[in-house]
Image: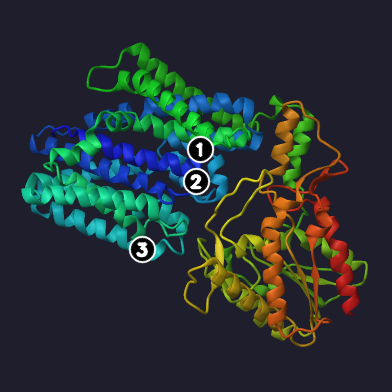
Amino acid sequence: MHYRTEIDGLRAIAILGVVLFHAGLKQMSGGFAGVDVFFVISGYLIGGKILDDLAAGQFSFKTFYTRRARRILPALVVMILAVMCLGWFSMMPNDYRYMGGAAVTALLSLSNVWFLTRIDYFNPEAKYDPLIHTWSLGIEEQFYLIIPLLLLLLWRWRPRYLMPVLALLALASFGIALVTAAEFRMEAFYLLHTRAWELLVGVLVAWSQRNRPLPTGMHSPAFSMGLLLIVWGLWSVPPTAPWPGLWTLPTVIGTVLVLWAPQAAPSLRKILSNAPMRFLGLISYSLYLWHQPVISLLKKAYLWPDTLYGVLAVLAAMIALATLSWKFVEQPFRGTAPVPRLRLGALFLAVAGVWGVAIAGDMSKGFPARMPDQVLDVLAMEDDYSPTYRKCLPSRKDVPTYDFGTSCTFGPEPAPSVLLIGDSHGARLAEPLADALSEAGLSMRQLTLSSCLPVADLINVGQSRAAQCPAFNKAVLETLQTETRIKNVVMFASWTNYMFDESGPNMFGRESEDGFYSVSTLTPLPVSQQERESAFAHALAAQLDALAQNDRHVTLVLPTPRPDVDIPRHYATQLWWGTPLPQRDGYPRAIYDELGTRLQSIVDDAVQISTLNADQLSIVKPAEIFCTADQCDLVREGKLLFTDGNHASLAGIDLIVPPIVESIRRSR
């Protein structure tokens, strides 16, 4: 295959999109689609190489997989070892233990399966994972286990079926992605069967160039259109778009058009084949490997720069690091010459080291002996919740088979008179609230669902199995119609997380968009935040009216302040670095008010829209308990009030329970 310098430029565009997206450039909303560009390029190059070898009668599985190992493993192993070394001095035990699992699965080309069950790629927490980007290597290597055998079989037995079979497989893979990506977002994002079409179209382009090339006069227009589609795709993808899916097509089709047009005008090809673009393309694999660890470790240690110049300095450091990796790690293993035994032995020793550290890390639960006991005590606050929290909180995948008759109940009454509904925040409240109500002779039933707000006519954009939330809430209302003894309903959720499409600013004042918000199930998707907020107010009003039927009293608990920084890890890190845990600490009240004021306005609108009178509704405002006029507390009397970036600890819950109990007592 003739070497095409413009492919290096395509790689440069792809890696720039990915790096800038992960660095937090909001304008690069679809930068993650750079990975899809890599997939198409990879299918094109590898598929083309296999086709050429088959045509020459020289294809060898041994040669193929040896080349892949020499291309992928050395730089990957060195990066993982470096992350393990740096993590020893900066990562908390649970993170270090978890990272070991990611490292081993990355070497086995299975990290996409590992991350599938652990973190949503678009979850804000994903930016703190130093190895999450290795999921794409898993996709590619799994594809390379299949495509050589498939091409070999078709070439030998039914060569005329090669193109139709590949095309049908690509269409089937794309169809599965379209059908499943909205409801099963993580499975569609991480697994091969919904990604194979992107690699297969690359193989199809390679086949076409050898059998049915694009007419010469079409090369320049195709090349130009392809570039425009790629750039448009990287900049325009909505953060909540199901992926892969229709929004993936611009970057994929654009890459196909560029690859399909090798005879485009020299002036066009120069856009991609100039020296800076070629250089970035050459180091793109190493830059891809190193950018995520640099970003995540800096952000974990709260060292990510706030200024443009600081970010540019970090990007320059990434490029320098990638250049060293390309020159001294990638290049010595490339080519067909035998690898010197010393170099090969060092690689095997490094792989053994990764496995050894990962296994020991798992057995020791992350080497906690690395840090003082005081640090571990602070970290233990991550599990500061009641014993029934996990047991009584179903997830969305449980909804279709969930038996409401088995929901958790607390207290002395045989039939509860209080119902608690909400998300995981409501679940955190359940047992402490039930204990307090028991002292008044009251029992409580809990119907909470993880990551779902308790409003029947709202659905969450950007969420896997999103339809299960309104289904659960509808079932709750149906259950209430038969539960006549319930006279009090308590609603508690992280309301701001659902009302707005941003989760920040965090306690440091840093803005972040999470692309996660609620819209009405009754109307088309609103086009503006104002319309979404109006829809939210009307849906909340309707929910309040429905809950208050049969002379029920509703206690609406507004959210606790959201520091949006993992509080135990924040103070544990400071303590590890020598700063004692303060007796009282917090962050500016003005930061909370940026969203808190908007939240209160929406709630006020909902109350006015509803038909409830003052005796039917009470509103508890945790922000007025956690915050003074100047500060929202994170620590009081040396106790952390949060177990992560938003969930209250038991000490924090203890502050919320009394006004809720008082609201219920007044309603009796």
Q: CA distance from mark 3 to mark 2?
A: 21 Å
Residue 451 in view in this figure: no
Which residue bears the numbered disc 2? 115
Residue type, mark 1 in image: Ala
Residue found at x 48% / y 42%? 22
| Tag 2 secondary structure | helix
Disc 2 crowd rating (10 Å Cα; few below 14, some 14-19, many 20+) is many
Q: Nearer the viewer, mark 3 or mark 2?
A: 3
Above or below — where is 346 with respect to 490? above
| Circle 1 crowding by C-alpha within 10 Å: few under 14, some 14–19, many from 20 | many
Q: Quadrant of residue 621?
A: bottom right
- Please report whichever mark, 3 or 2, sits nearer to the chain's N-terminal start: 2
User: Looking at the picture, which amino acid does disc 3 mark?
Assistant: Leu
Closer to the camera in the image, 607 or 565: 607
Q: Quadrant of the N terminus?
A: top left
Place of residue 257 in the rendered image (x, y in percent of width and height, measured from the top left): 20, 50
Residue drawn at 36 percent across, 44 percent down:
35
**Residue 490 position (above or below residue 248):** below
Q: Amino acid at mark 2?
A: Phe
Q: Which residue is mark 3?
A: 178
